[in-house]
């Protein structure tokens, strides 16, 4: 009869190897769920498993008990370690090894523990098969969901809770009467994102998030030299100029109104496809979404400068209808493009290079600078195109003042629903659902005409600068995104000499 190692050694080994739990299991129920099997254990692994239970065996003995070990493993895999067939095989193994399996002996129990160790051994249990990833999202679905964010109650509740105001048409006024929707220099501004880049008629209005409503129109007064414009030089490089310097070059300086400018800042939430999204772009092409701003100056004419990381473009817009603002690419007009920042390493590199030269640039920032022109001068507008107004709000044309509520919608909810939503928001505080966007330009679509007759036609009225930061949904919009908004708005506050509303009393 083979001698066992002292019982105390066996007990310590059992506890040390974590198999005591096996011994405490109810034999009438499986102690573990069935596990997949990826192959037979090696001789060394069988020796190691039995050795951990104080049973030392040699190579010849392993060969003799291998068949019963494999039978026991098969049953343990299918029905759990507490199965009687496993115990039967353990008795057979004890007999083959000449070990005592009679009443009062722990031999069979220890062999079952060795089988359990082999079942759990990582080298033999393959990782659980991962479920197949969900099918990639369709670009059209994502495009429609993003442009319709203002219909999602949880998003609007988050906006309301943080005192932010989402709009599809932003009032970017140079002159408006106090407490009124009317004035002599009112401009409507929208951001049109195309579902198909080559089809301007596929565009829909994106959502802009302001920190105050259109009617109240909270703005900042910022020193004009804080605004930097980036002009492409004849040798292809970028030259940075302050706004007053650029105005002087264009013949648009004002002797009384160029010390400070009106600034409003906002975030544009635009649909930008990911590389895995179906139907977004041709195979192998970094995905992007084409967009254009539109502007409708009621009853006035303005010279407009747009400025992005790749440079600035000039245009003249007049009264009459919404007019598109596009990029001037070597005398050709092109839509702007929005890409997920990680898909545009070239633009991120350009941003780093220009910042290293001391320039004030931001890959996701868009400046729209409105310079008022005199009404008594004959000025020709750029006429770069008009947006597809029939698609503005999902196929329904509405009056601009009816397009969005003046403050975020508030939805009534029961107490339990409100508490559940609050807990959900708290859990999402540490995550972000909006990703950084890099702004570039798309393919050219015809000749670019700046307009004419503007030099020396500056009206002595304030300039308005609309600062827009582009972001795109990469998940559920969360409280962390609200913190990002607040931080960006606060940075502009620090540059202002005044903040408030010209149209409602403070």
Image (cartoon, helix red, strand yellow):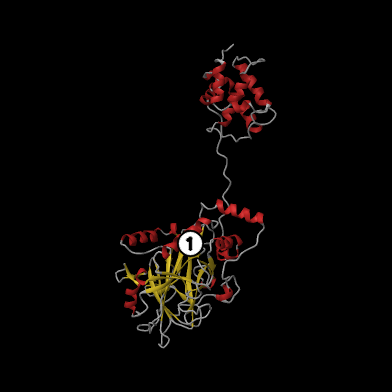
- Foreground: 226 or 256? 256
The quarter in which the N terminus is drawn is top right
Label 1: few (<14), some or many (≥20) within 10 Å? Answer: many
Q: Which residue is mark 1?
A: 471
Q: Residue at x 55, y 32 (%)?
A: 124
- Foreground: 299 or 317? 299
In this rendering, does residue 273 appear at all? no
Q: Quadrant of residue 126?
A: top right
Q: Would residue 349 be found to the left or right of residue 476 on screen?
A: left
Q: Where's residue 419, x and y in %?
A: 62, 54
Q: Residue at x 67, y 22 (%)?
A: 88
Q: Would residue 457 be found to the left or right of residue 35 on screen?
A: left
How many numbered marks have been drawn onto this rendered protein structure? 1
Q: What secondary structure is found at the residue carrying circle 1?
A: strand
- Outermost residue toward the top in this view: 1
Q: Where's residue 487, x and y in %?
A: 45, 60
- Outermost residue toward the right in this view: 28
- Outermost residue toward the front in this view: 506
Q: Where's residue 240, x and y in %?
A: 32, 68
In this rendering, does residue 338 appear at all? yes
Q: Where's residue 48, x and y in %?
A: 52, 24
């Amino acid at each position: 009869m083979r001698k066992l190692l002292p019982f105390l050694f066996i007990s310590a080994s059992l506890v040390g190897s974590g198999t005591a739990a096996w011994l405490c299991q109810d034999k009438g129920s499986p102690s573990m769920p069935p596990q997949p099997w990826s192959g037979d254990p090696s001789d060394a692994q069988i020796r190691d498993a039995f050795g951990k239970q104080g049973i030392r065996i040699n190579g010849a003995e392993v060969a003799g008990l291998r068949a019963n070990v494999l039978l026991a493993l098969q049953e343990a895999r299918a029905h759990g370690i507490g199965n009687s067939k496993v115990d039967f095989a353990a008795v057979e193994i004890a007999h083959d090894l000449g070990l005592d399996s009679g009443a009062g002996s722990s031999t069979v129990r220890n062999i079952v523990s060795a089988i359990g160790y082999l079942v759990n051994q990582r080298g033999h249990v393959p990782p659980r098969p991962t479920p197949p990833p969900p099918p990639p999202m369709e670009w059209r679905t994502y495009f429609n969901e993003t442009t319709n964010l203002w219909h999602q109650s949880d998003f609007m509740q988050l906006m309301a809770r943080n005192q932010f105001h989402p709009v599809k048409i932003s009032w970017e006024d140079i002159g408006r009467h106090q407490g009124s929707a009317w004035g002599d220099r009112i401009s409507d501004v929208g951001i049109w994102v195309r579902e198909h880049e080559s089809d301007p008629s596929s565009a829909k209005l994106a959502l802009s998030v302001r920190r105050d409503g259109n009617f109240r129109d909270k703005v900042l007064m910022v020193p004009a030299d804080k605004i930097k414009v980036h002009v492409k030089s004849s040798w292809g490089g970028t030259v940075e100029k302050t706004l007053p310097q650029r105005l002087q070059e264009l013949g648009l300086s004002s002797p009384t109104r160029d010390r400070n400018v009106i600034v409003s800042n906002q975030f544009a939430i635009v649909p930008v496809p990911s590389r895995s999204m179906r139907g977004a772009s041709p195979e192998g092409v970094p995905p992007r979404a084409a967009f254009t701003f539109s502007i409708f100056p009621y009853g006035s004419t303005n010279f407009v400068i747009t400025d992005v990381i790749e440079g600035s473009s000039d245009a003249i817009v007049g009264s009459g209808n919404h007019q598109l603002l596009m990029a001037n690419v070597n005398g050709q007009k092109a839509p702007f493009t929005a890409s997920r920042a990680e898909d545009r390493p070239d633009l991120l590199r350009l941003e780093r290079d220009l910042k290293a030269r001391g320039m004030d640039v931001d890959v996701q920032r868009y400046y729209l600078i409105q310079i008022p022109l005199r009404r008594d001068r004959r000025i020709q507008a750029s006429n770069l195109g008009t947006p597809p107004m029939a698609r503005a709000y999902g196929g329904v044309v509405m009056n601009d003042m009816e397009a969005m509520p003046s403050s975020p919608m508030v939805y009534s909810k029961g107490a339990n629903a409100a508490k559940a939503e609050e807990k959900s928001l708290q859990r999402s505080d540490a995550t972000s659902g909006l990703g950084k966007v890099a702004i570039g330009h798309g393919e050219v679509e015809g000749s670019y005409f700046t307009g004419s007759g503007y030099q020396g036609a500056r009206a002595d009225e304030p300039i308005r600068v609309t600062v827009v930061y582009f972001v795109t949904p990469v998940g559920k919009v969360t409280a962390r995104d609200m913190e990002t908004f607040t931080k960006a708005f606060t940075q502009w506050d620090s540059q202002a000499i005044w903040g408030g509303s010209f149209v409602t009393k403070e």
